[in-house]
Image: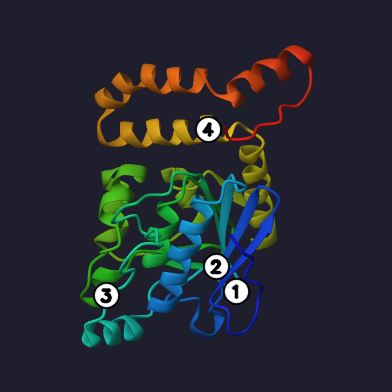
Amino acid sequence: MTDVPYGQQTKITVERKGHVVLIGINQPYIDNRLDPEATESLARAYFDYDRDSSLRAAVLFGHGDRFSRGVDVDAYKALAQSGKKMMDGPGFIDPLGRTGPALKKPLVVAVHGDTWNMAHEIFLGADIRLASDDTDFGQDENTHGRFPGGGATVRFPREAGWGNAMRFILTGDHWNAREALRMGTVQEVAPNRDAALAKAVEIANKIAACGPLGIETSLASSRMAVDDSEAALAALDEQYRALLTTRDFQEGRDAQAQGRPPNFEGR
């Protein structure tokens, strides 16, 4: 995966830091709303991260005063009228997780300021979520004659509980970071944007220090359980047997016996 440095014309930035990659939404001139080009760039960044064996965790964040106000409606309307398809072909992972393939590696997200609609749906697709205390969440499509078509009707009730999700989806009311923490969609609230991002990077580095094969198997098992807990339980023995034969499994045992930090290689 190649770095994509910050610049005025760069819609999605990519910054590698060891085994962690930082992916930034960078369209502050339109409130970080995602147009089709930015969405495809984000989808390509997810794909490249997932297939780069040197990367073990990713952090998604937003440049500027807000994470994102969601979708650039006019740009998407123009795309629909053109008849063109988005993410048509290989090399993409849908940031909304509506179609396969899915990320096999962990994604941590740090949000701040306005985090609305499609942006909130991308946020819900992450594995671990942090928010600045100034975050303003919104899923208010119904107040505009639309509906949350990017996955919130599936993930929000699952993560927050039916009543909590319907309270905001059906009214269009916004909520803050403390309310998100109460509902369980946020794991930690930080005092400001910089602190939220720093905490996300800290967590990502802790993940990256673990055995990557075990991390991927943990994610796969947990995601299977969301859809079918019995199938997930039935698969545990086979998943564990596969890990027993890996170099990382033995390295974990050797490091523990020798009292040293493990050096995992992902094999």
Q: Amino acid at mark 1?
A: Asp
What is the spatial separation of the Cα atoms under label 3 and label 1, in whole angstroms?
31 Å
Q: Closer to the N terminus: mark 2 or mark 1?
A: 1
Q: Position of residue 241 (x, y in %)?
A: 44, 17
Q: Are marks 2 and 1 in contact (CB under 8 Å)?
A: yes
What is the spatial separation of the Cα atoms under label 2 and label 4, in whole angstroms?
35 Å
Q: Closer to the N terminus: mark 2 or mark 3?
A: 3
Q: Closer to the N terminus: mark 3 or mark 1?
A: 1
Quadrant including the C terminus: top right
Residue on which disc 3 sits? 85
Q: Nearer the viewer, mark 3 or mark 1?
A: 3
Residue 257 is labelled as none
What is the spatial separation of the Cα atoms under label 4 and label 3, in whole angstroms?
34 Å
Mark 1, other Cα within 10 Å: few <14 / some 14–19 / many ≥20: few
Residue on which disc 1 sits? 65
Residue on which disc 2 sits? 113
Residue 213 is labelled as 4
Identified at 47% across, 45% down, the residue is 127
Secondary structure under badge 3? loop
Q: Amino acid at mark 2?
A: Gly
Identified at 65% across, 32% down, the residue is 264
What is the spatial separation of the Cα atoms under label 4 and label 1, in whole angstroms?
37 Å
Quadrant including the N terminus: bottom right
What is the spatial separation of the Cα atoms under label 2 and label 3, in whole angstroms?
31 Å
